[in-house]
Each structure stands twice: as C-alpha cells, then as structure tokens.
Amino acid sequence: MADEFKLMIVAGEASGDAHAAKLVEALKDASPGTKFEFFGSAGVRMRAGGVESIVRADDLAIMGLPEIAKALPMFLKAFRDLKAAAIERNVDAVILVDFPEFNLKLAKALNKKGFKVIYYISPQLWGWRKYRRRVIRDHVDLLLTILPFEKDWYAQRGISNVEYVGSPLANEVRPDLSKEEFCDKYRIDPNRPLIALLPGSRHKEITRILPLLLESASLMAQRDEQLQFVIALASVRSTNEVELAMIEAERSGLSLPKILMVQDETYNALNAADAAAVASGTATLETGIIGTPMAIVYKTSGFNYKLIRPLITVEHFGLINLIAGGRIVKEMIQDDFTPENLVKELFRILEPPVNAAIRGKLKEAAGKLGDGGASKRAAAAILKMLEKR
C-alpha cells in the first residue's frame, strides 16, 4: 500500500454527503498507515470528517429542471473548479457519490483526462434514462452498487466493472431513543397515535409538499382529537421554513393542531410514530428499515413532472417498494397527492391489523439490504483498485 493517496470525492446533497463521510472514515480505518488527502465537493459531514471543500455540496442540492437551469452558472463553475483541482493536484482517483446529473458528466470529463473514476451508489439507470449506461461502461473504472438487483441489471447489459457492496443504510438506521424515551423527552402521550410528517430535504420539497401535509394533519385532527403529529426535519433545512409554512397555512384559514417539530431526530421520530407520510427519496428506505407504516408522497411543479415522467420506466417510485418487488406501501405522486387521499390512507394504516401486516412486509423488504458494512466493503474495493496502480 502506498504511503499517500490524493483522492477527490464529490457529493451533491445531504444523503450523498452522509454516505461520502462514512466512506472517508472507512478508508482511513481500513488503512491507518496511509496518509490520505481528501478534497472535492463536500457537505457538512464531509467537512467535519476532514474533506477539503473545493465546492460546497450544500450549494448544489437543487432539484427541478427550471431551478437547475437558473443555477447553471453555479454548476458550471463548480464543474470547472473540480476539474481544475483534479488536474492540478494529479489525483490518484476520483470518487463520485450519487448525484448523477452532475457526476456522470464529471466522470466522463475526468476519465478522458486519464484519471481513474470510482462511482459509489450507482445512478438509478434501471429507473430512468437508461441510455446513460454508456457513460458507466466507458468512463467509470469501478461502480459500487448498493441495491441487490443492480449488479445483475448491469451484467445483463454487458457491464462488468460493478461490485455490490450492500446498502450503507443497513444496520446503520437506528434510533437513539426508544418510543417511550422520545415521548417522555417531548411530552408526547405514548398511548395516543403519533403521525410523523417528513416533507423532504430540499427547499422546493418543503414549499410544495409541506403545505399538503399540514392540511392533511388539520383534516385528521378534526376527525380524531387523539392524534398527535411530529414534523421530522432534515438537518440541512431551517426550522424557519417550517414555521413560515405553518404561519401561511393558518393565514389561509387552516386550523392546525399542535405539531411538534424536531431536527436531526428523524429516526427517533419514525421509531415513535405509528404511521408516517414521507416524501419520496432516501427517507422512504430509512422509514422502511425502521419499520414504520407509511404513505409515500411527492409533488413537483407541473412543468417538471411533464418533462421527467416519460423518462421514468420503473413501476414504483418508492425505494422500499422497489426493493420489495411490489407495492407494499401506497404511493401518491403529483396529482394523486391530495390531502383527502393522504388522510384516507393514513387512517387505513393506523388500523391495528393493517399496521401490523405492513410492519411485517417492511421487515422482510429491509432484510434484502444485507447485514450492514457497505462503507467498509466499498473502502476495501477502492483500496484494492488503488493498490493496482
């Protein structure tokens, strides 16, 4: 093993930042005698783990084609800065983490310059825009996949530079508090039903999804005063965003029940909840691993949806449904996501027999993700490639 490696690592949103930070830690643990120089596009957790920030990943977490178009100069600058840094420092390898719209272009550009490219957390090409697999074939030296069916999917298409390392969430999604401890901490009655509301981790998700969740909570509270609600907010979002949304809701005439808001305690909130409404994304997988019955929701602008929907070829939007191979939790996407539909589904999954059945199916699906250790396996595969150099 070489004494020193220079590695560029690029993430672009909160989940990728978290996975990249764990990978950095795993690389250091796997080769304690090696001096690593990590730099690239880093979020809060990567920076805390010692990754030098050429680009702030926090600034790149933008979703929606019109929004991305407006931010194009920023993305172009980030692209140029990262490419220049890789060339100037002559990196030993480039590690790209998720964030396919940006990272696939970076993979192509840097691989053409002669750099080894490792991609951790495969782009979901099996779901949409399959044509991009040519970039993986031609410009990625090692693809590390986290979902059990992905390696076979690539193999069937003649792509063999793929290694399945398991989900980085397996055995790592764990609450710190029991239901009783969480309820005691926030003065919640453990004997009354608790509904968790997860509006997403991006600003646009908060603005489009949270108002519908608040209206749903209002309708449910009118029918059952025993219900309790908690909004679990991602660490990258400001509590002010939720507070403003609640003020706007009440100004529009909505009568809101008392709603607890927690930040950086999503797992604890989900563990304590009897049911949840969860914005489609990584959180649906985390909720499934914890085992909380949920409804998956999502809404974007009409323009975005019309552009993106024809490109999506999978039967399910929710990751937990994809892994299960069937619709074990209901999905309400775009026009199907209405307060009336959500209220109906949440009351349904609160029914004890239905609730218990869904918990059993979620446990079975989560079992397909492996027994943990994805970051360690990914680190081992990366070090093996580096040794060959």
Image (cartoon, rainbow, N blue to C red):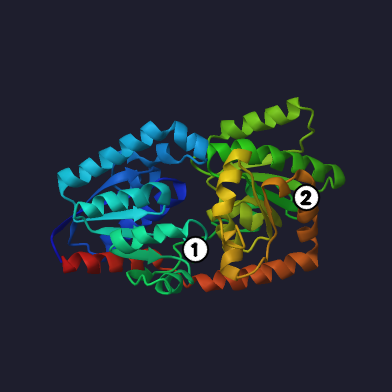
**Location of the N terminus (image quadrant):** bottom left
Residue at (63% x, 40% y) in the render: 302
Could you tell me which secondary element the residue under label 1 belongs to?
A: loop
Q: CA distance from mark 2 to mark 1?
A: 29 Å
Q: Which residue position is annotated with label 1? A: 126
Q: Residues within 10 Å of mark 1 (few under 14, many from 20)?
A: some
Residue toward you, 234 or 7 = 7
Name the spot of residue 387 as percent of width and height, x first: 18, 67
Query: How many labels were placed on the picture?
Result: 2
Residue at (61% x, 64% y) in the render: 321
Does residue 187 show up? no
Does residue 218 show up? yes
Q: Amino acid at mark 2?
A: Asn
Eyeballing the image, is 220 above or below 273? above
> In this rendering, would 276 be left or right of 168?
right
Q: Amino acid at mark 1?
A: Trp
Furthest residue toward right: 223
Q: Which residue position is annotated with label 2? A: 341
Name the spot of residue 319 as percent of width and height, x first: 56, 61
> In this rendering, would 60 be left or right of 287?
left
Residue at (46% x, 69% y) in the render: 150
Furthest residue toward left: 3
**Location of the C terminus (image quadrant):** bottom left
Residue toward you, 51 or 101 = 101
Mark 2 vs 1, N-terminal side? 1
Residue 54 found in image quarter: top left
Name the spot of residue 287 as percent of width and height, x first: 60, 58
